[in-house]
Amino acid sequence: AVRPVESGGGSVQSGGSLRVACIAPGFFSGTCGMNWHRQPAGAQREWVSRLTREGAMEYSDSVAGRFAISVDKAKDTVYLQMDNLKPEDTAMYSCQTWGPSWCRGWGQGTQVTVSS
């Protein structure tokens, strides 16, 4: 089974950048997709971006133009580059893998905090 693990969160000032990573051995089989979600403290989880099985990348309106997915297949890693961060981007960021049952998994999350 794919067991994603996130890393790379941290604290940054408004306008800064961070890159979070999702390490998911077995993900790049061509049958799995990945979502990035975020959940601010005390609020509902929000979908952020998607990497489809075909390699297409999709973004929510709130992050489009500021966030970008990239991959490093040799490291079994999907990155979410976050630029021009805003305080409202503060949240726990999690990756979720989807597809056939063996593809499905959730990471534990990594905290991103943006101060004004």
Image (cartoon, grey):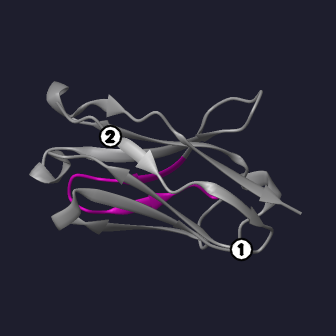
Residue ID for mark 2: 4
Q: Does residue 53 belong to the magenta stretch?
A: yes
* Residue at figure coordinates x 79%, y 53% from the top left: 88
Q: Where is residue 110 in the image (x, y as percent from the top left)?
A: 55, 44
- Side of 16 relative to 45 (left or right): right
In contact (CB < 8 Å): disc 2 and disc 1: no
Q: Where is residue 14 in the image (x, y as percent from the top left)?
A: 80, 68
- Please tell me the numbered disc located at residue 33: none
What is the secondary structure assignment of the residue under circle 1? loop
- Side of 100 relative to 66 (left or right): left
Magenta region: 48-61
Residue ID for mark 1: 16
Tell me the quadrant of the picture where the C terminus can be found: bottom right
Q: Where is residue 96 in the image (x, y as percent from the top left)?
A: 38, 38
Q: Does residue 72 belong to the magenta stretch?
A: no
Foreground: 102 or 7?
Answer: 7
* Residue at figure coordinates x 46%, y 33% from the top left: 108
Residue type for callout 2: Pro
Q: Is residue 18 above or below residue 114?
A: below
Q: How crowded is mark 1: few (under 14 residues within 10 Å), some or many (20 or more)?
A: some
Q: How far is the residue under mark 2 from the one under mark 1?
A: 26 Å
Q: Position of residue 98 (x, y in %)?
A: 28, 36
Q: How crowded is mark 2: few (under 14 residues within 10 Å), some or many (20 or more)?
A: many
- Side of 80 relative to 18 (left or right): left
Foreground: 56 or 27?
Answer: 27
